[in-house]
Image: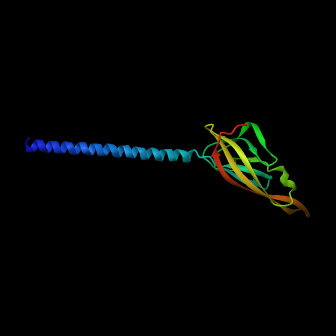
Amino acid sequence: MNAFEKWQVIVGASQMGALVVATFLAFYIGLKQNEINNRLLKLQDYVAIAAVPNPNANVINLINTGKINLYLWGFDMPGNNQRLKKPRLISSGTNDSAYYWVNPPPTLETITTTQEFDFKLYLTDEFNNKWISEHGGEAIPSESIQNGKKEKVVIIKVWSYKTYQSNWSF
């Protein structure tokens, strides 16, 4: 084998080595890109509900802070468990109309000391995945002056614990 042939073998082996390294790098980059795409997909389709008291209407607003539409099928509250025949849409979005409401427990209207309560929401998303959203609240008895008269009122605070996937059924 002359020098030219040796040089061709060395160049060919180098090219083959570079091709093997490039193949493994492309495979590694593809795996990492799949991980990134899966994380982005989860962020795009996350489910989140915030519970906010509405003092003007004496209800609890349920605001969809996630990225997909949700459907409320029912909820469990102390003294106020409800199941809906048809689900209520809680649309995704950031505008003021993207919420649904539930009434607080009826027993809170007659309280004399501060009481805490918990409640659960039963939801589905656009892909028919089932979710449970857990929340809590506190009812504080207070007084308000309306038309020069003292009236007993209840101040409601609410908060959200977590939302998780669950295979609930009624």
Query: Is the N terminus in the top left, top right, bottom left or bottom right quadrant?
Result: top left
Residue at left 17%, top 45%? 10
Residue at left 21%, top 45%? 14
Q: Provide residue 90's location: percent of width, then percent of height.
A: 68, 44
Q: Nearer the viewer, residue 160 or 87?
A: 160
Instruction: Specify the farthest residue to the top.
Output: 85
Instruction: Specify the farthest residue to the left.
Output: 2
Q: Provide residue 166's location: percent of width, then percent of height.
A: 65, 42
In-image side of 113 versus 170 (left or right)? right
Where, by quadrant of the figure, is residue 5 drawn? top left
Query: Is the C terminus in the top left, top right, bottom left or bottom right quadrant?
Result: top right
Q: Nearer the viewer, residue 99 or 108?
A: 108
Q: Nearer the viewer, residue 154 or 95?
A: 154
In-image side of 3 versus 81 (left or right)? left
Q: Provide residue 34's location: percent of width, then percent of height.
A: 45, 44
**Can residue 147 be spotted in the picture?**
no
Q: Provide residue 148's location: percent of width, then percent of height.
A: 91, 64
